[in-house]
Image (tube, helix red, strand yellow):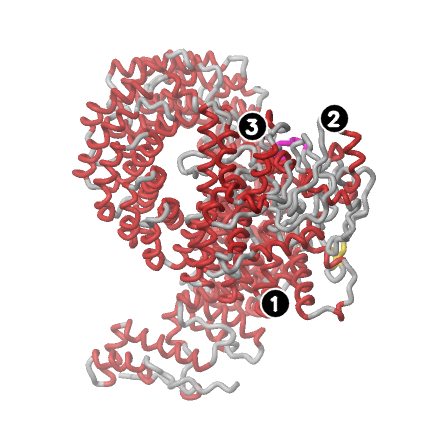
Amino acid sequence: MSDADFERVRRSQAERNAASGKFGKTDSSKQQSGNNKGISLTDNMDTDLYGGPERGDRYVASIPAGEEDEDDDMDGSGTNGSGRLIGQYTATDAQVNEWAQGDAAEGLDMMESKETQAQIASRESGYQKKRFQRDLSPSRDGKSYKEVMHERELEREEARVQKMIEEQRKETIADGKDSDEEMDGVQHEATLKLKDTAEGADGGNGDVEEKPRERKRKRRWDTSGEDAQTNGDAKVETNGTKTDGDQTDGVSASKRSRWDHIDAPATNGSAAAPAPSKTRKWDLAPAAGTAAPTQTNGAAPKAIPTFGTDLNARNAPLSDEELDAMFPKEGYKILTPPPGYEPTFAPAKRVVPAAPPAGSGGFMDQTPADAKAMGAQLPSEIPGVGDLQFFKKEDMAYFGKLVENVDENELTVEELKERKIMRLLLKVKNGTPPMRKTALRQLTDNARSFGAGPLFNQILPLLMEKTLEDQERHLLVKVIDRVLYKLDELVRPYVHKILVVIEPLLIDQDYYARVEGREIISNLSKAAGLAHMISTMRPDIDHVDEYVRNTTARAFAVVASALGIPTLLPFLKAVCRSKKSWQARHTGVKIVQQIPILMGCAVLPHLKGLVDCIGDNLNDEQTKVRTVTSLALAALAEASAPFGIESFDDILNPLWTGARKQRGKGLAGFLKAVGYIIPLMDEEYSNYYTGQIMEILLREFQSPDEEMKKVVLKVISQCAGTSGVTPGYLKETVLNDFFKSFWVRRMALDKRNYKQVVETTVDLGNKVGVGEIVDRVVVNLKDESEAYRKMTVETIEKVISAMGAADINERLEERLIDGILHSFQEQSVEDITLLNGFGTVVNALGTRCKPYMPQIVSTVLFRLNHRSPTVRQQAADLVTRIAIVIKQCGDDHLLSKLSSVLYEYLGEEYPEVLGSILGAMRSIVTVVGIHQMQPSIKDLLPRLTPILRNRHEKVQENTIDLVGRIADRGPESVNAREWMRICFELLDMLKAHKKGIRRAANNTFGFIAKAIGPQDVLATLLNNLRVQERQSRVCTAVAIGIVAETCAPFTVLPALMNEYRVPELNVQNGVLKALSFLFEYIGEMGKDYVYAVTPLLEDALIDRDQVHRQTAAAVVKHVALGVVGLGCEDAMLHLLNLLYPNLFETSPHVIDRVIEAIDAVRLAVGTGTVMNYVWAGLFHPARKVRVPYWRLYNDAYVQSADSMVPYYPVGEESGVTRREISVMI
Amino acid sequence: MADKLRTQQQLEALQNKYVGTGHADTTKHEWTTNIMRDSYASYQGHPPLLHYMSIGMGQCIERTRKQCMDKMVLPCGPAPATEE
């Protein structure tokens, strides 16, 4: 049921009430004036096709969406509450609505433009799109709480009556009677009372009236004049008494009367001919009478129509002549519109309605909406705004005013303000980042002078725009956030409007949108205060629309987290116990459900209050309330685990006894709550309560409902996890039934079930032991269904890896290996699950595998020779996993057989496979050792050198690992020449993207240098410092550091320092960097080399180049940290003197390095000495000096405050003395 | 700009943790107050030093400790009136 419908019904009822003088004030006049304005703004758009407020009812009217509140907690399947007898067999409301809204229909289009894809609305579900139906009219603000509540009551009443009528109709249809006769009888009676007022209408009226009533199509043209007449009259004349009002309302609300909600008398009586078409084009007939629309749109200047896109021509209402030509002469009659009819194209919802999407009519739709096509129409530059990043058609509706040329001197202050805000908003929304920044700042700074009203009146409609994109929404939300902060309590009158716009963010799919929404609402509640938030949101709590209630509940939860749960608790208590409507209770409980989801374990202090609040609702008369209560309890228990069982004490009994009474969805909710509460209990209780619930669980094992299955499995695993449930109990009562109902082939086919069953089985296994589980499932390893075998392997893998294989007896072991080999061989798609399973089983069994080893290895060998690369890869991977077990079993001959076969396959062409083969090779080398390796290293390594050139990441990683291992363990088996060759290849690896590869390459340099001496390696590396690539140079520097570390610094330093003499910036920098790594790696060893490198550092620290000094500072840091307490203070002080002037550097990297270096020197030479440098500048007249000095001071203070104490500059001259310290004995 | 904001936040976080840290706008009075408090706190935290001082002043350790503690209240007198 759309809001538009409600709105319409509500309006007509309100009018009736106004007429009867029952309620002093209505907003109908306001609405009407709004209507008029709306017309003028959209004169050239066909409201019939492109929306306007009535847009929704055209679609929804045909399939009443059922007032039943569809709870989406358990699942989202919408039921169809329509009058159709076979409702279930057609599309759901959601689907129908989705197409009806248009956006979704486009959303399915593969060819849609990127622009549309970026729009938020295009990827929203039908449910989320309901946000567009919410009312953003200003009507809410002026009203008191009482009025709003009254309005809600009316809405509910409307909904109730409508539902009754719907049901009645359903019944009559079901009874096979002609519904009209029933209805006519009623209406006849009603209008008899109003006989005197019924005179004005003519008979044809009713005919038209009947038209949209689809089900009565057969009667459309032959309705008797009388009943049609009365039918129509009842609405047009609006009855005087309240009781009548209800009755006729029902009729008017049943969505087939188009005339009833027309406000003012028709001014134009032309061409209201009955039309067989279902479109409501006829509503626009009067506009046709006046030919071309004469009102010009003040805000949006007319777009210059490009060829073929002239909408006016095609969308203009048909003229009488055209209609005459179209319809047959006989069988049709031209009717005059009833008195009181006026066309309705009043966009009451938006302040400014969106312009019609230019391309939406007919086949010309495909005209690309790119900038070029729009170039003629859309300005890229708005006066006073500057160049924008983009300007969309839709923006014109909002920002059109800016394009007009007006004399600003003639405008009032208010108008000027409005234009100013508009300009700023446009800059924020469409501008370049710098523009955006300044505009946002201006908006924030002037927020209070602009005032809340003008700001929000412009921002909020923008957020309701259908073509809004993520980026725009983000920016606008940001604006709201900033502005909120400034406006503070001034925001109060707009709270509801803001909520209407922001609440949908809470159910967005995008996590960040949800976070943003939460932030806004929490700021809003802090600004407006709790009382105001409650009074604003209270009316929405029992709103007729489930969407509104849902979003309101979420918003309330945010308010609770912002203002604290205790403040909201009394209100929640009241709502949850509301006697008036179950919707209120439902929403109240939902709020309580959302709070723990939002706040997690922070609910613990208030757990008792929250549980008490909803406890009684477990026995609510409404199923939905009971269900949501159980879900709320589950959420609370989940958030507070493992604490807080005391708080649940009161509801344990109702929950457990309630679970026995429930069926279906309700039961699922209860079980879920039970599942989350049991883990909180202590041993005794959990045992008892599990026993109590188990009966139901076992019964529900057979349930065909997917949802129920999921819940039951979850609860079983939760129960199994508690200490109170004994293995014996599980074996006796649960396992048999469990395996019977869930370990069936069908379960393996559905991904969700599959996962859940495996998980639950593993949880049970953790309790009852490996043997029990494996014994039961091992037969399935030879099942014919592959998915089922896979599920079995996964379960076995998880159980065994968690608990080992000690529990598996000999017979079972045999069956297990046999089964797993079988399923490994039989797999049609190579799967990591099977590989893992095999590996885990073999590793867990260890030496017990010895009897099966020949068989396993021959399987592997066979598969290594397979023609499918994935099979080969998998076989090689398996070798990697089981090599160590083969060694443990003492089957060295099998290993050498494997390694020689692998050696043969080093020519493999698929890099993935090659990588796996190398990995297998490596694991064999690791277990057998370099010297026992079967194809000897001397043969192996030359084969690897060319492979090093392979660019594939996996290959690189595995080769470098293998080569590194050889270089580490047995470098002597290859000659130095070969190693040098490898060194050259390794240099390329320093460019690898993966850090692991670079690190392995660096380490390998170290090993090789150790094996063949550093000279040659170093020469290679130093040459590499000259290359252009930064990453390569950095890695070379690291490698030099490593070589220095492995071969002692004195072998490296002279050559390195000599290299510094090369007059090339890159090289010098590289040398400094290498020194920095070198000193970092050698640590204390550095004390012997400090004086050697000091002259070099001196030079570097006074270099003109910033980066030079920066790197030198890094070297100083590492040197200083290495020599703390080793007596190199003089050198360090010397370096500090050179370093200190760099304190005034502003580049962040440089200053950071310099400060670090000074800190390091402070450690080396002592706090007092360095602080003497610092005191001088702390109170320097120039701020630019003080800032870095204080930074140094703070660092020193944090790192060594106590050692600063003796050196504080106190004494008589500074006015403060510490006499105690001058005590002398 | 964002950088400036971040440094500002970092500084605030730092000062929440370490009261004695300062910034470019710290007044001399604030700073001296801090260093005096740090000094007295440090004396009390080093028992040998406290012992040494008490011997020198000819009183028991606890008395010296109490003196130190007392002096931590307004060690440099009240803050001078700010001229605006």
Q: Which residue is mark 1?
A: A450
Disc 3 marks which amino acid? Arg
- For the point 50% across and 18% down, which residue is it? A872
Decide which of tag 3 and tag 1 comes sooner along the chain: 3
Q: Which residues are magenta?
A: A105-111
**Number of callouts:** 3
Residue A550 in percent (x, y) is at 44, 45
**Whole-percent x and y of residue A185?**
49, 33
Q: Residue at x 42, y 80 (%)?
A: B32
Specify the amino acid type for callout 2.
Glu
Q: Nearer the viewer, residue A269 or A897?
A: A269
Amino acid, disc 1 = Phe
List the residue tagged with mark 3: A215
Per the rendering, the mark at residue A330 is 2
Single out the mark in the foreground, 3 or 1: 3
Tell me if I can see residue A142 in this picture: yes
The Cα atoms of the two marked residues, 3 and 1, are separated by 55 Å
